[in-house]
Image (cartoon, rainbow, N blue to C red):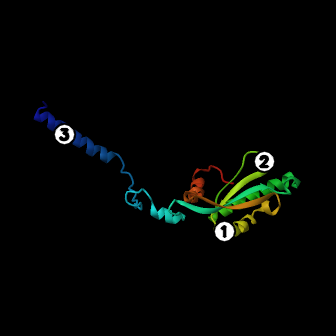
Amino acid sequence: MIKRKTFIKIYLFVAIASVSYSCLVPEKKRVVQIDTTEAGSGIDSLLAMQLGADDYGMKTYVLALLKQGPRRLMIDSVTATNLQKAHMANITRLADEGKLVAAGPFTDNTDLKGIYVFDVKTIEEAQKLCETDPAIKAGSLIMELHPWYGSAAMMQIPAIHYKIAKKQP
């Protein structure tokens, strides 16, 4: 059994060490987070509402399939390079405006060249946005539009993408 004097010495040592440690180690910044989850469900109702999610966490988008256009093979390499830069600038603009949720090329060598996922209500709205693409205007690409039902969480892709991309177009 530990003697009373020894116990007091150990207790004082631990108390002094704790106080010393707390003085030496900087205090972490405290972040206040508001819990918007529904009790016991893990569902963040505020986030769901901000993203436009339905009860399944989903929403409707318009998916554009970008295909090889009738003029694609007629365009010279210099024009094609400039067209690609303008195409990428248009993608960036649409994403910055919050209209384009995701975009990207297919990496196999087929007539199907890429996709756009638009956060718009109608095919007509997506059609107007596609018509701003210089590659579509030039006939290098054509589009095929479809309503698509997907996770509302996709709405966060652009913000996350900018946090992880080391290079921007």
Q: Nearer the viewer, mark 2 or mark 3?
A: 2
Discs 2, 3 touching: Cβ within 8 Å = no
Disc number placed over residue 122 in the picture, else none: 1
Q: Which mark is residue 79?
A: none
Residue drawn 22% across and 43% down?
15
Question: Which residue is outermost to the top?
Answer: 1
Q: What's under tag 2, amino acid-wise?
A: Thr
Give the distance between the C-alpha atoms of the residues marked 2 and 1, in whole angstroms. 28 Å
Quarter of the image that includes the N terminus: top left
Quadrant where the image shows the C terminus? bottom right
Q: Nearer the viewer, mark 3 or mark 1?
A: 1
Pick the residue in front: 152 or 146: 146
Q: Position of residue 96 (x, y in %)?
A: 63, 63
Q: Is label 2 in a helix, a strand or a loop?
A: loop
- 20 displayed left or right of 38: left
Rendered residue at 45%/63% (across/down): 45
| Between discs 2 and 3, the one toward the N terminus | 3
Q: Residue at x 50, y 66 (%)?
A: 49
> Pointer 2: what residue?
110
Which sits earlier in the primary sequence, circle 3 or circle 1? 3
Residue bearing mark 3: 11
Identify the residue at horizontal 71%, vertical 62% (top origin): 145
Q: Nearer the viewer, residue 146 or 160?
A: 146
The amino acid on which the numbered mark 3 sits, given as a three-letter code, is Tyr
The Cα atoms of the two marked residues, 3 and 1, are separated by 71 Å
In depth, the one of 127 and 156 nearer the eye is: 127
Q: Residues within 10 Å of mark 2 (few under 14, many from 20)?
A: few
On the image, the x and y values in percent for residue 53 come to: 53, 63
Count how many numbered circles sit on residues in the image.
3
Mark 3 and mark 1 in contact? Answer it, CB < 8 Å.
no
Q: What is the spatial separation of the Cα atoms under label 2 and label 3, in whole angstroms?
A: 74 Å
Q: Amino acid at mark 1?
A: Thr
